[in-house]
Image (cartoon, rainbow, N blue to C red):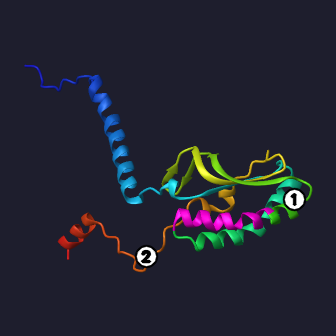
Amino acid sequence: MLPDYEIKQKPTKIERVIPFAEFILILIMIQCVLGLFTGTESSEDTIRFRMLAHSNSAADQAIKEEIQLQIQPLVENAVTQSTSKQELGENLAALEPTILQIATSIAGEQAVTLERKEALFPAKRSGLVFHPQSEYDAYLLTIGSGRGDNWWCALFPKICFVDEPEKKEEEKVTFFLWEWITGLFS
């Protein structure tokens, strides 16, 4: 009599694809859960700023940085005093002459312009929130020809993405599954 032996078969194509499909589904589920807990900030509720130096040379960058140091406290003050986009727009419109005066005095003979318009901003990730490249309502401060790569959002991140007011009481975060497991053993 012949001894018993196991017949091994080659896995089918579907059996080879199933682990990859499961992995992709798990990644999608994790992304969805992260999206639920992180929420999204409305980019339409903010006024962004873009500041362009004349060029990327060290001298032009120094001029841009000096203007930034002088303007930053004024703009941050306007942001903290505002409770809505409309109020922020009014506060910043009142600052326009002061900002132009400061920028013109520092820039010397270079022309300085400040205008509020729809400006193109590159894609940006802020924590787990992704802001796509698009045109946003923004103030554009241009020094000279404005050929330098200078995003004001990098200098003033709170202006581009205004933080929501802090809640007085922080809610304690609990996880149902963990609470259930520890409840079984206590």
Q: For residue 91: magenta?
A: yes
Q: Nearer the viewer, residue 126 or 79?
A: 79
Image coords of residue 180 (percent x, y): 21, 68
Residue for badge 1: 107
Label 1 neighbour load within 10 Å: few <14, some 14-19, many 20+: many
Q: Residue 89 at what x, y percent from top left?
A: 60, 62
Is 32 left or right of 159, judged from the image as shown? Answer: left
Residue range in magenta is 84-100
Would you identify the image quadrant in which residue 93 lies? Answer: bottom right
Q: Secondary structure at mark 2?
A: loop
Q: Is residue 175 magenta?
A: no
Residue closest to the far left: 1
The first of marks 2 and 1 along the sequence is 1
Which is closer to the viewer, label 2 or label 1? 1
The residue beneath circle 2 is 167
Q: Secondary structure at mark 1?
A: helix
